[in-house]
Image (cartoon, coloured by chain):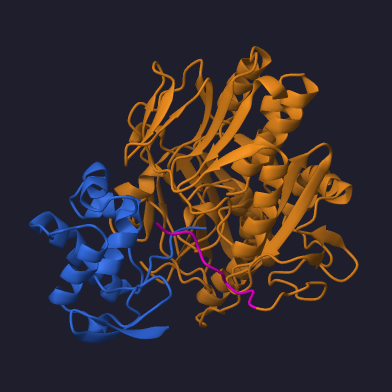
Amino acid sequence: MTMTLIADAPVDVDAEGFLTDPEQWNERIAAEIARQNGIAELTDRHWLVVRFMRERYLATGDAPSIRALGKESGVPVKELYQLFPKGPAKLAAKIGGIPKPKGCI
Amino acid sequence: MARKRIVILGGGTGGTMTANRLRRRFDSDEAEIHVVDRDDRHLYQPGLLFVPFGLAKPEKLVRSRRAQLRRGIAFHECEVASVSLEQDEVLLADGTKLPYDVLVVASGAVLQPEETDGLVWAENVHTFYELERAVALRDALEHFQGGRLVVDIVDMPIKCPVAPLEFVFLADWWLRERGLRDKSELVLATPLDGCFTKPIASKHLTYLLEQKRIRLEVEFAAGEVDGAGSRLVSYDGREIPFDLLVAIPLHGGAPYVTRSPGLGDALGFVPVDPHTLQSKAKPNVFAFGDASDLPTSKAGSAAHFQGELLVENVIRFLDGSEPESGYDGHVNCFLETGYGKALLIDFNYELEPVPGHYPARIGLPLLRESRLDHLGKLGFQPLYWHALLPGRNIPGIGTTMPLAGKKIPAGAAAGKVGAR
């Protein structure tokens, strides 16, 4: 775990750049992480997913998988991949300032 | 105490074992035990892997569910319509109502090919996760003249997460036996970032894949199967052409779980406490094995290791005591690697699979290909029918993961679990 500056704010991140303390997050940090990962601007649809992920994590201690996200967020899986290329659950978690989703075993 | 009613939904590995154990623990005037399943065909699921290669006879894998249950257990052959958590009652499709003091959900996972665009079973599109489909795949392989054989895991969770790996290992052996290996390409496509979710095992297994010239396509999230065009397309637009596709479809919980308000999660699995197996929905509801959302493999061995504690906790609940936190995530599996060899892996929530021996210093080799592990895998089938399902304890094999015999490398841990 290392301390780094994102959008002028000091935050703790893991080796892959996920925030380890969701309390350190703010919207400017989200926008900056999005830019670093190839999303120039966060649209309303992006925010819907990011907030859903974050709220779910804060309520349950775990972020939803991509399938659960597709079923519950109201954004279909296909669109999730358009919004967050490569790994929607992973990238939305990173932007939302929560740890990397554990996924399945 | 007044006569209690225990209702168990599912007469598979977990449900059968639990019903038999509970029947031995309670006299008939202490508890009624009911088991519900939609049919009377108990399938030995570990045998499915061998069917496509002609190594297991389909009819030898199925027995009557009812016949595996002890006397004094009521078996209802019927679909479940829904569960009412409020009324503590199960409603069956034929209108029968089964009120319960304790409910055990052991109805496993179902395949959901319909959730993936274009995933329709066809001459060139198969799976081996169901008996009828495994037989159809056997027939397709009979006519296979070489080409591109692609195995795709659509998404996790799936039952027996090592089975797709075993399938490509066996396919490599089978193609070589038939003189088709040089005319064939083998591809394993997975949504994970490696061939297995745990780093040390992933490294060992990746080496085996390379040795057997099997191409691994990682982080491939299949969005569409185009059977007519013989290609698999990912959500991010990558394509994998195939001559024969073996797909592992999405899995979900039994349909009645989704029809029962408050019982399941978005995928139809029942959320439970990972150590006590008590559901998060209500204290008198327990779930385990494939039907639960436990963060461990969906496998018969996991249900077996959970089973003993589950029975204790059902009894404790009926006694009015707190459940015990005894489950550590223990699971193990024999992984068939072809040419009469297999390797064994053993792990839990905390410790990923490591080399050594199981269950103690003298025992079966772990994470290393051996003939002994292959024999262990074959020898397990009679043990399944005659010891595991009746709920007898297997000597030396307990609920929690043994450490004796394990060689734990520095840095081995719960490990990175595959996320994307």
Chain that the image shows in orange: B
User: In the picture provided, is B325 more to the left or to the right than B155?
Assistant: right
For the C terminus of chain B, the quadrant is bottom left
* Observer-nearest of B280 and A38: A38
Residue farthest along the right direction in this orientation: B362
Q: Quadrant of residue B45?
A: top right
Residue B85 in view of the camera: no
Total labels: the figure holds 0
Residue B393 in the image: x percent, y percent? 78, 63
Residue B59 in the image: x percent, y percent? 71, 25
User: In the picture provided, is B197 more to the left or to the right than B358?
Assistant: left
* Observer-nearest of B274 and B229: B229
Q: Main secondary structure of the magenta part?
A: loop
User: In the picture provided, is B412 more to the left or to the right than B223?
Assistant: right
Residue B228 in the image: x percent, y percent? 39, 15
Look at the image and give the colour of chain A.
Answer: blue
Tell me what residue is drawn at x 82 percent, y 43 percent.
B341
Residue A55 against residue A22 in the figure, above or below: above
Residue farthest along the left direction in this orientation: A44
* Observer-nearest of B260 and B373: B373
Q: Which residues are magenta?
A: B411-420
User: In the picture provided, is B142 more to the left or to the right than A64?
Assistant: right
Tell me what residue is drawn at x 71 percent, y 59 percent.
B345
Residue B184 against residue B413 in the figure, above or below: above
Residue B21 in view of the camera: yes
For the N terminus of chain B, the quadrant is bottom right
